[in-house]
Amino acid sequence: MITNYLKTAIRYIRKNKLITSINILSLSIGICSTLVIFLMIQYDYSFDKHLQNGDRVYRVISIGDFKSAAILVPLVRTIDEEAVGVEKVAPIFSIYESKIKIPKEKDDFTIFPKEKNLIFSTDNYFDIYPHTWLSGSAKNLTYPNQIVLTESYYKRYFPQAAVSESVGKSIVFADSVTLQIAGVVADRKENSDFKFDGFISVATIASSESMKEFHQWDRWNSYNDSYQCLVLLSPGSTVASVEKNIAQLVKKYKKDSEEDKFGLQPLSDVHFNSDLNYNAVKPATLRNLILLAVFLLTLGAINFINLSTAQSIERAKEIGIRKTLGSKKSSLIKQFLMETFVVAFLATLVSILFLPLLVHAFDGFLPEGFTLKQIPVAPTILFLAIQLIVVTTLAGFYPAWIMTGYAPALALKNQISKNSNLSRSTFIRKGLTVFQFVLAQVFLIAVLFVSKQTRFASTMDMGFRKDALINFYIPDFNRANKGDILKNKLTEIPEIKAVSFGNQSPAFDGSMSSSMKYDASLEENKEISFDVRNGDENYLKVYDIPLIAGRNVRVLDSTYEMLINEKMLESLKLESPEQAIGKTLDDGKYTIVGVMKDFNVASARENVRPTAYWSAKRGYVMHVALDQEHPESWKSGIAKMEKAFTDTYPEESFEYKFLDETIKGFYQTELKLSKLLNWAVGLSIAIACLGLFGLAIFTANQRTKEIGVRKVLGASVTQIIFLLLKNLLLLVSIACLIAFPIAYYFMNQWIQDFAYRTELSWWIFALAGIGLLSIATLVLTTKTYFAAKANPVDSLRDE
């Protein structure tokens, strides 16, 4: 029986190639989209799932005024030595990039100037994240000047040397620190947010005063998200008890600790918490992806339902004959479900062919590290099989029920219009068409509004200059001398207006904060938390940050002069900027000498935060302001800048970044959302228009003789086109009217996440509505024009 159903289905599909092609294309778009999104979600949920004790691994995070993954460096050692209920502590002190030199013969070196994925840690890291050891031992990391490499990094550094010979080989880190290879581990294939390729012993920092100073080894008031900490709790320990113990330790070693609060973040939460991980995947994003997949698949299924029920009129006689010859309703339903299954199966095969194209199209939205080579075969086949069954059931059952409900007598007498099922199916078909275009219209409005908000946020006034401004990092730890030399060279370049040497720019893709006691505070042990920037006296000039009181900072030897912004006045409970001048923090170590106008250090999602800038001799970022009024001079200015850099650092490569590009990076989530919505709009409109085109074909075919009669009676082509278009375009217009309030509600909810926002303008709705109607008109006109131009003799000769 199944063989007979299959043969009949294939025969019907061959007979109706155009409609079948439309159905296959519609379903394949939806199936391929859901497959890509399934693979993305499966990939994201695979992170750090391989650890045997993963449920006991936590990251220590700051949960005070500034929530972040940053931790106080001395607290890591304190937890390791004194915390109760903690089995292992693994510091993760990240290194943005550094130079690695491999010694060769005769004092020569092979140089790797911009090595990334290196950290300072201890042997405990390998207890939390087990690796396969190819040589050496993790215990060697208890000694200073030791490094463990992954196999891939070792082979890059020593391509001719066997791994068995690795232990004891030397490499030079940051131009001045000689490290001995303590071991080599196999590369980890599992997905993880804590996957690294080089592990330098933390004891290396402790053995060098300059490195201790740079890495804030003993500072209990400085936060930097380059310093993180993982802990493995002891069996039976609770999160609450360990958090309480950490709070006691902070209070023990830092009396002014009321604002310093720390918590434990489960390892399973790290990949999905964007507040604590800049590369995190937001659960809301995954939910949106799932919704998008469901919508696209639903749109494809609606096309199939609409075209199948519309086509049922032409199949009425077939159904009547089958019933007259004894076919039961259940048998007919199975036959029609088999037809749906074959179409859905062919659509699944086509979707697999589309997969590389869609993955390439989604390239900017895919998770970092995701490739088709990592596709898990068994789960993917299972997913496609389940999806095939679901699509067959959802898309096939209703048309089958409608068609098998026709009375044989009415069907054989061409009186199918008297069947109640037909009028009901016509109403439902119109409703489903409206639903398709409601989704397409909502997506289109969302695209326009998200793009408008992203453009507004990335170009808004943040309180400092961000155009024609270049930042670049200074190499190695001994930055001060050479950095000053380079700064002096840059000031002599005429295309450069100002140069400053310090740490980060006002806004960057990270966080730097501090907490200090305000010496004039009436509250004992009360600290204030604020964002931090520091550097030389040219910083304000480079970024055009105005002072509203006091003067600029001076670089001193033993104390620090500080500038604060207006927002920080509120934290200090001062009523006027002038009152802040002369006030001190941290027992007189920092003296406020001026007040800056407010500027925003974060994205448009956040209001202005309390921020301080203090003088500092050392720095690792050069800030260069080019001539805004003469952009034609930038190219030559950058060339001269590069020459000055390579003259100062002949072994380094010059890499710079414009500040406005960094700020655009704040809105990667919105840019990805915009790209996703673009695809959602394109795919949903494509699917909806395919369905509309199919309905236009049936409308034209059903009214062929009517068109012929009207033409004989003098109707023009334009009148006939309007006759065929008006009902279908009315459905699209109704869809637009329904979509407007829905889109307004969801976009209004979305924009609430922004402290600085644009308006949801009326023209967005008008443009979206006109655009969708124009596309629908173009699609429909393509078919109706040829129907209107047809010779009436051909349509009337069969009468």
Image (tube, rainbow, N blue to C red):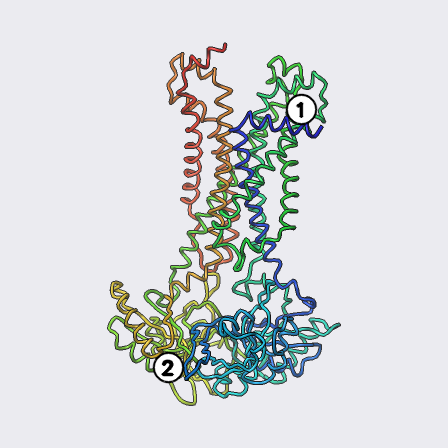
Q: Is residue 535 visible?
A: yes
| Quadrant of residue 775 within the rendered picture | top left
The spot of residue 579 in percent (x, y) is 42, 80
Q: Amino acid at mark 1?
A: Thr
Disc 2: which residue: 553
Q: CA distance from mark 1 to mark 2?
A: 86 Å
Residue 585, placed above or below residue 729? below
Comparing labels 1 and 2, the label whose residue is closer to the camera = 1
In the image, 469: left or right of 739?
left
Q: How many numbered circles does the render carry? A: 2
Which mark, residue 404?
A: 1
In the picture as drawn, the residue positioned furthest to the bottom comes out as 558
Mark 1 or 2, nearer chain start: 1
In the image, 589: left or right of 144?
left
| Quadrant of residue 76 within the rendered picture | bottom right
Question: Dot 1: what SS?
Answer: helix
| Quadrant of residue 140 within the rendered picture | bottom right
Question: Dot 2: what SS?
Answer: loop
The spot of residue 61 in percent (x, y) is 59, 72
Judge the density around disc 1: few (<14), some (14-19), many (≥20) Cα neighbours within 10 Å.
Answer: many
The spot of residue 689 in percent (x, y) is 48, 35
Please name whichever residue, 756 or 386, is drawn nearer the observer in this view of the structure: 386
Q: Amino acid at mark 2?
A: Val
Judge the density around disc 2: few (<14), some (14-19), many (≥20) Cα neighbours within 10 Å.
Answer: many
Which mark, residue 760?
A: none
The spot of residue 410 in percent (x, y) is 64, 15
Q: Is residue 526 visible?
A: no
Please name whichever residue, 766 or 41, is drawn nearer the observer in this view of the structure: 41
